[in-house]
Image (cartoon, helix red, strand yellow):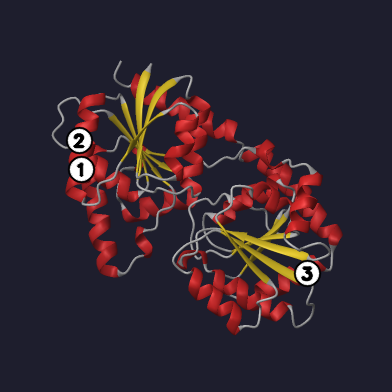
Amino acid sequence: MIKIIQIDSFSGLGGGQQILFEIVKGLRSEFNFLIIAPPGLFLEKYSQLGIRTYQLKEKNIIKIVKKLRESISKERPEILHLHGTRAAIWARLAIIGFKNRPKIIYTLHGFHLPRKNFLVRWLFLAIERFLNRWTDVLVCVSGADRNLVLKHKTIPENRIVIIKNGIDIEKFQVNKELVEAEKKKLGLTDKFVLTSIGRLHPPKDFSTILKALKLIITQNKNFRLLIIGDGPLRKLLENEVEEFGLNQCVKFLGFRENTPILINLSDIIILSSRWEGLPLLPLEAGASKKSIIISNIEGVKETIINGETGFLFKPASARDLADKVLNLYYSEKLRKKMGENGYRFVSENFSKERMIKEYEDLYKEILNENS
């Protein structure tokens, strides 16, 4: 079997990690995979499937590169598939000088470098341009990211492909009894539930949701907000909740594996990000037949039909977000219609089966170039 090493730099299970897991799970009978990543939940899920893993425990970049070089030399894979900027830097440094190097596929799960400050941006874009000499294919998860890569000229256009993210739609068809039981457990019976999911760090901009909720409850106190996820800003956000007088309205649930149930018990899903590649939350909302309100930014816009599957709102505008929440609150008919439209849109364009097939085709195509 063709051997592929998947390399990731994150130990949790974020959007990019969920995508990688679906690829490996879907193609494990076709390819021989080895997963290299820091220890954590991410690797545990592969072990449960009987897929080989290697824990990258080193912290120093020199030691990381050395360890990767040793692993690649020992395993002699046909393909290295790299996920995210850090993993891509490590792995491409590790294969410099190899006589018969593996083919390299690098998936950008969101091109965030142009949004860094000038010095960091200049340095890392220069590094990307240099290391992309060893990148055979750069996969962008959205048309917006592809355009951004071309704008900054980090790799020739003929080495870029777009493979949009996909999700397991069936996973979000949840038994109504389970949904009602979880809603009762959380004390949300007869409440109007808003939910947002993501890592609690600056790009997700949860503060705007809290500010919008503060405006909303001046008109109606029946709203509750679930924040699912964890991260460095949790304490700051908890302080904002107290400052805004929202203690009775907001629940921080941390990392949860039962997100399909939590999405299904919600009335509206919200994503307030400042930037994204192609986020999974709008797809998961559509799969659950839930209306969604998301910030009007590149990448995200590719996951929604504004006014049909949900609403776009002006980024960082609590007032605009609050108005759109209230618009949907007062129209159950509109919420239901958007949910049905969203389900069709996601089913037709963002299934995991379509995504997995496109990666399978890419793996075979890149190897056929040698024959």
Task: Identify residue type, mark 3.
Answer: Asn
Res 13 visible? yes
Check whether the beta carbons of the residues at disc 1 and disc 2 lie within 8 A of each other.
yes
- Binning the other alpha carbons within 10 Å of mark 1 as few (below 14), some (14 to 19) or many (20 upward) gives many
Q: Secondary structure at mark 2?
A: helix
Q: Position of residue 137 (x, y in %)?
A: 35, 36
Q: Position of residue 81 (x, y in %)?
A: 36, 35
Mark 3 or 2: in front is 2
Residue at image x 52%, y 42%?
164
- Find residue 65 and name its label: 1
Residue at image x 47%, y 24%?
28
Q: What is the count of numbered marks?
A: 3
Task: Identify residue type, mark 1.
Answer: Val
Mark 3 or 1: in front is 1
- Find residue 69 and name its label: 2
Q: Secondary structure at mark 1?
A: helix
Residue closest to the eye, 356 or 146: 356
Q: What residue does disc 3 label?
A: 327
* Location of residue 64 by image quarter: top left
Residue 311 shown left or right of residue 140 in the figure: right
Residue at image x 70%, y 64%?
194
310 shown above or below 54: below
In this view, the residue farthest toward the front is 185
Question: Quadrant location of the N terminus?
Answer: top left
